[in-house]
Image (cartoon, rainbow, N blue to C red):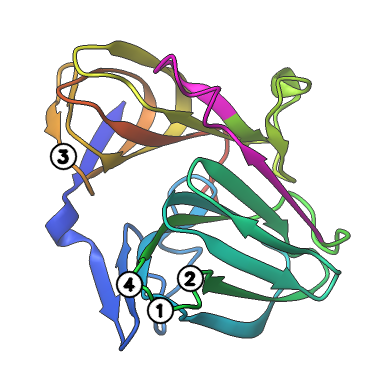
Amino acid sequence: MTTEVIRAADRHHWANEWLTSWQSFPATGNYDLFGNAHGVLVVHNDDLVDAGEGLDAHQHQNMEILTWVLDGSVAHKDSHGTQVVLRPGTLGHMRAGRGITHSERNADTRHSGERLRVVQMWVAPHADGLDPSHAERDFTAALESGAPVVAASGRPEHAGTGALEIANRFAALHLARPRAGQRIELPSAPFGHLYVARGTVEVDRLGTLAEGDALRTTDSAITLTAVDDAEIVYWEMHASFDV
C-alpha cells in the first residue's frame, strides 16, 4: 500500500497565448507517456482555453480520450461525423482506435471572455485498431446527491449502470460532488488516481487535498470528507504498464 501526493503547484505547467495546462503527468513536449503513467492513466490535464480558441484538426490513434467539462463549453468535431458542444457536467469520450481526426475548441466564438476549463484524461485501450467513435453523457443530475458516480468504465461489473463504455476492461472513472461535511468512500484498487477539481477534501489517514492536488495510490481504498463543496475525479485501475 503506497500513497503519493502531487500538489497543484508541483504539476507540470505548459502555456501559450490561449492555453494554460496544468498536468498531473507531463504530457506536452518530449515525454514518455507510458513511462510516466500510473496504472493505465497516461494523461491527466486541467486545461484553461480562451474564448474562441482551441486545437485545430489533429489525429489520434489507439487511445481512449475523456473530457470532463468544468466551466464553459467545448466544441468537438471529428472525421467520423460527430459535431457536438459539451457543457459543464458533461463527459465526452472519444475512442481514437485505428485513427480519428478531431478538433476541440472553446465554443464561445463571440469572444465574450468565457473561458473553457476541462479535465482531459487519456487511458490506453486494452486492444489496438478498434473502430473510432465518440459519445457523451450529462451527469449533472446523477451527481446531485454528492455520492460517487461511475461515469466511464470498461469493467464488466459496471455494464448497465449508465456509464460510458471505454475500451479498457481494467479501468473505471468515478466522479463526485460531495457537499461540505459529506463523507464518501472510493473503491479500493491496485492503482488509484484521485484529483480534486474544486474545493478541499480531507482524506482519512493522509490529510488535506486542495483544488489541483492529486493522490496516487496502490492497493488502497480512499475515504474522504469534503471540507467545503468539492468536485473530485477518481480513476479505479486494476492493471499497470509496469505489470
* Disc number lying in front (4 or 3): 4
Quadrant of residue 227 within the rendered picture:
top left
Horizontal and vertical percent position of residue 219: 40, 25
Please report the bounds of the magenta region as a residue range.
133-150
Please name whichever residue, 240 or 204, is drawn nearer the observer in this view of the structure.
204
Work out which quarter of the rendered image holds the C terminus and state it.
Answer: top right
> Is the Cβ of the residue at disc 4 closer than 8 Å to that at disc 1?
yes
Q: Which kind of residue does numbered mark 4 sit on?
A: Gly
Q: Is residue 65 visible?
A: no
Q: Which kind of residue does numbered mark 3 sit on?
A: Ala
Quadrant of residue 233 within the rendered picture:
top left
Numbered mark located on residue 223 in the image = none
Residue underneath mark 3? 210
Please, what secondary structure does the residue beneath circle 2 have? loop
Q: Is residue 208 visible?
A: yes
Relative placement, left or right, of 155 versus 240 is right
Please name whichever residue, 142 or 165, is drawn nearer the observer in this view of the structure.
142
Residue underneath mark 4? 113
Q: Residues within 10 Å of mark 1 (few under 14, many from 20)?
A: few
Q: Earlier in the sequence, mark 3 or mark 2?
A: 2
Q: Earlier in the sequence, mark 4 or mark 3?
A: 4
156 over 23 or under it: above or below: above
Numbered mark located on residue 111 in the image = 1
Q: CA distance from mark 3 to mark 2?
A: 29 Å
Please name whichever residue, 82 or 100, is drawn nearer the observer in this view of the structure.
82
